[in-house]
Image (cartoon, rainbow, N blue to C red):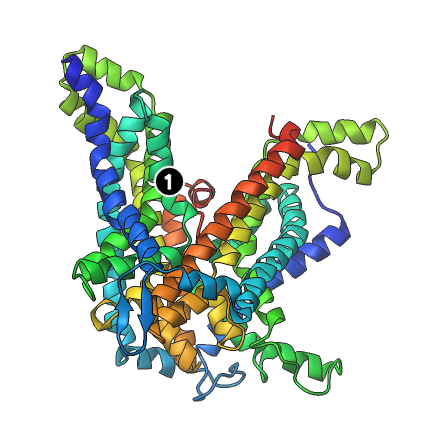
Amino acid sequence: MSDRRILAPYALSAPATAVLTAFMAAPLVMVLMLSFNSFTMATGIRPGFTWANYAEVLGDSYFHTIFGRTFLLAAVVTAVSVLIGAPEAYIIHRMRPPWRSIFLLIVLGPLLVSVIVRTLGWAVLLGNRGMVNTLMMRLGLIERPAEFMYTFTGMAVALVHVLVPFMVLSVWASLRRLDPAVEAAGLSLGASQATVLRRIVLPQAMPGILSGSLIVFTLAASAFATPAIVGGRRLKVAAMAAYDEFLNSQNWPLGAAIVVVLLIAMVTIVLGYNRIVERRFHQVFQ
Amino acid sequence: MTVGNGRLALLFHAAFIAFILAPLIVVGLVAFTPEAYLSIPTTRWSLRWFVAIWNSDFIPAFWISLYVGCASATIALLVSVPAAIATARHQFPGRDALVAYFLSPLMVPHVVLGVALLRFMAEVGLTANIFGLIMGHVIVIMPFTLRLALAALTGMNRHCEWAAWSLGAPLSVVFRRVTLPMIMPGLAGGWLLAFIQSFDELTMTVFVASPGTTTLPVRMFQYITDNIDPMVASISTALMLLAVVMMAAMERVYGLERLLAGKGDN
């Protein structure tokens, strides 16, 4: 009996552990090994151990541009998401009951629709003869269609649209614990609206902003569909570069090295971020 | 209670909502164009692009997506529930590490998972095999089914279990007759969320897509990178309607806010 009780949780966890190990952990190890293999057009993938793929990814300016663009895009998207997502979460938080759920639903609902559908909307809006350009030309703001498709701006706009719901959700969740009486007390004690925002609301929203930023940043840095459709081949990001190596150039070892570098860079950023956040903001998490 | 927003705040809010809805509305309008090119219908509306879907290869892709979604959500739930019981109801060495392991797919970008799955399937001879794709989806969605199963198990009143057990019901009966019915809404929510995740998954799937495993998002992606015509808009519109229906269902079963709070990837 006692043996069975001790072993029971392990037995219950076994199926999930087995599935994860077989279909995630083992494949990831395979990718790591693959990234050390060599490749030539003539012979294909050759087993062996070489650092050549990493030397190429880390040394070639072509890949520097791609990784620089990827992380710049992620940083811009995160910053914009904070700037528009956090105030929107606060506004929704302050709404009266029926409106609050309605607008929360409108903001979060798109998460249930494929990212392809949402990106398609931007492709239609941002095209040369798209709505944004037509509108701006009619208003006399511009004379010729402005380029949005296949530009960094276009990618950033579409990606903010795809990811900002996560920011709103995250900030809104942490504002939910804010007792409205505290705000009222601040106001009644003579604090200005701005002071209340800065001294009461912002500290309360901070955990949500910080965790939302992490979610948005990591998703933006590894985004594939939106940059691929709006940015196209001209403005490749890391995920797109890996896709090309695997499915177009067939240079699997190089593609494997790209994703390993991406994974390591992201894990480093996430861990470093957590460290800094814990040190600088540890009081807000208490 | 301080409620209500200033005028400036409402203006900002209106702009934000317009930003969120504009691309979706535009897609919904273009879907009804009678023209052969992308345009917003003004005087004449047409369903020709919805009709065109029926004879396209989006339909088989839809069935594949449906199959993969149902299969992977079910498998993920079946392995998650015992794992959730183990971690919610037992204290044992390595428990925290195990929970971290179960949630670890959330930390790995889908593009990395896609590459891994492609390599894995090639190595073990599963290339172009739908089983491999389903298991890949199970990995992606398991953290969600696990989390919702955990939430259901820790949120339920355990006195009911104890009462049944003290009245002499064997553990298996307690689970089947008491625990399972009580956590069912949570599990249903988890299954639905997992299904949606699988149904919308693109980045991982695109790496292993072959003619037999081309899901709807992958087919749409391939189509859009070639050219954008009103047909993809009408498919997108159909998918949005589907999402609205599912949203209503989830709101009924589980409460959408709680469900979406558990979602973490696109």
- Chain ID at mark 1: B
Residue neighbourhood size for the residue with mark 1, other residues' Cα within 10 Å, grouped as few (<14), some (14–19), many (≥20): some
Locate residue B228, reporting x and y percent.
44, 81
Q: Answer left or right for A178 relative to B200.
A: right
The part of the image, by quadrant, that contains residue A255 is bottom left
B220 above or below B118? below
Q: Residue at x 58, y 36 (%)?
A: A275
- Furthest toward the right, the residue is A190
- Please say whether residue A150 is visible from this viewpoint: yes
State the SS at label 1.
Answer: helix
Q: Residue at x 25, y 39 (%)?
A: A16
Q: Nearer the viewer, residue B96 or A44?
A: A44
Q: Nearer the viewer, residue A24 or A139?
A: A24
A194 above or below A85? above
Q: Residue at x 41, y 52 (%)?
A: B247
- Please say whether residue A98 is visible from this viewpoint: no
- Furthest toward the top, the residue is B166
The amino acid marked with disc number 1 is: Leu
Q: Answer left or right for A184 relative to B213.
A: right
Locate residue A20, reporting x and y percent.
27, 44
Q: How many marks?
A: 1
The part of the image, by quadrant, that contains residue B176 is top left
Q: Which residue is mark 1?
A: B103
Figure quadrant of the N terminus of chain B? top right
Locate residue B42, reporting x and y percent.
54, 83
Q: Residue at x 32, y 32 (%)?
A: B98
Locate residue B174, reporting x and y percent.
18, 22
Figure quadrant of the C terminus of chain B? bottom left
A238 above or below A147? above
